[in-house]
Amino acid sequence: MTIMFSFIKSIYLYPFKKPVDTIFLRVTYNCIVFVLSIFYRLRFRAELNRTKNKLNSLRIDFQGSNIFSFANGPSLRDLDTKKLAELPRSKYIVVNSFVSKEKGLVPDIIVFADSISLCHERYKSDFDYALSLGVPIFIPAHYQKYVSIKNKNIFYFCGLFNVFSNNYGDITKPLGYYAISAFCSLSIARSLSTREVYICGYDNSYFDTYSVTETGSPVMHHHHFYKEDETLASGNNVRDGFNTSDYFYDFYLHFKFIEKISAESNMFNIARETYLTVPRRMLSLDVYKDE
């Protein structure tokens, strides 16, 4: 039984680490995800149905509004939260630490797709603060075990992902990327949008300071917009067993998934500095800090 579960897990995680270059691997992967999704959606049927109902009510609430979807990259430093808060007909979707690091803007939706935000003491305060705001919070359905209390503002999305899926909008089904809060935020924005979606903080800038230690271990430098804590703003992540090609394949996937999610949608990238060619850029909004 343990061997079988290890095999299933290895096949499921394989496309997130390496290119799937054989028909056998792709067929096996799709079969595993299909079977897992049946069990997953049966197990969390009530939670996912509740989310569907909530999304329907949010569509009414978001009708006629522009949506701002913020990740936590350094490009957010150029935005003026006071100007953002004063914009008419605007809704805000943010992820993870944004709520505790930037309190000048109360979001309309908060997304946590990483278990570390719910169970690690260093980051759990972000989730606790988000709960205090009383706005809808979206987390993967299987992470409800980390939530110690029932809360009417917590909603659950499908935590299974299928990199070959073309589903980038229905969060109650397996989505076509891997579990990153910023991607899930884009899918929710895409699902709710009736006008334009503006994104910022999706910098994917880790690669420009990528390095290798003297012992040959790759180091990935995390970059975030919050500056008061330089340790957090530029944390290092050493992952032994990963080669340079593994890292750059991961960087490639980050860019590719954003391109797929934003395709055929009315999304615009408002970051002043960016590595993204997709979605289209827009720098004409009056949302930036004065020079």
Image (cartoon, rainbow, N blue to C red):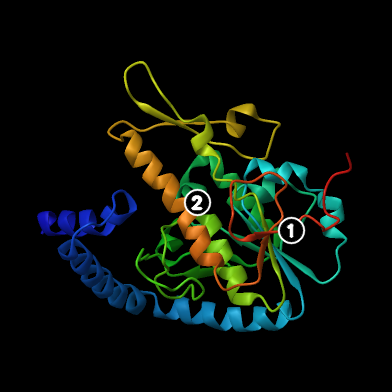
Image location (x, y in percent) of residue 278: 58, 58
Q: Which numbered circle lies on residue 118?
A: 2
Which mark is in front, 1 or 2?
1
Q: How crowded is mark 1: few (under 14 residues within 10 Å), some or many (20 or more)?
A: some
Relative placement, left or right, of 117 versus 289 is left
- Numbered disc 2: secondary structure: helix
Q: In which quarter of the image is the C terminus?
A: top right
Q: Can the viewer see residue 152 in this picture? A: no
Residue 119 pos. (x, y %): 47, 48
The circle drawn on residue 209 is none
Q: Where is residue 79 in the image (x, y as percent from the top left)?
A: 78, 48
Residue for badge 1: 282
Q: Is residue 93 left or right of residue 5?
A: right
Q: Is 147 in front, or is 52?
A: 52
Above/below status of 155 relative to 19: below
Assess whether mark 2 and mark 1 are in contact (beta carbons under 8 angstroms): no
Q: Which of marks 1 and 2 is nearer the N terminus?
A: 2
Q: Position of residue 48 (x, y in %)?
A: 46, 77
Amino acid type for the residue under numbered disc 2:
Leu
Residue positioned 37% across, 66% down in the render = 160
What type is the residue that disc 1 sits on?
Met
Q: Residue at left 52%, top 30%?
A: 209
Please say if 104 is above or below 29.
above
The answer to which image quadrant residue 91 occupies is bottom right
Please tell me whether mark 1 sits on a helix, a strand or a loop: loop
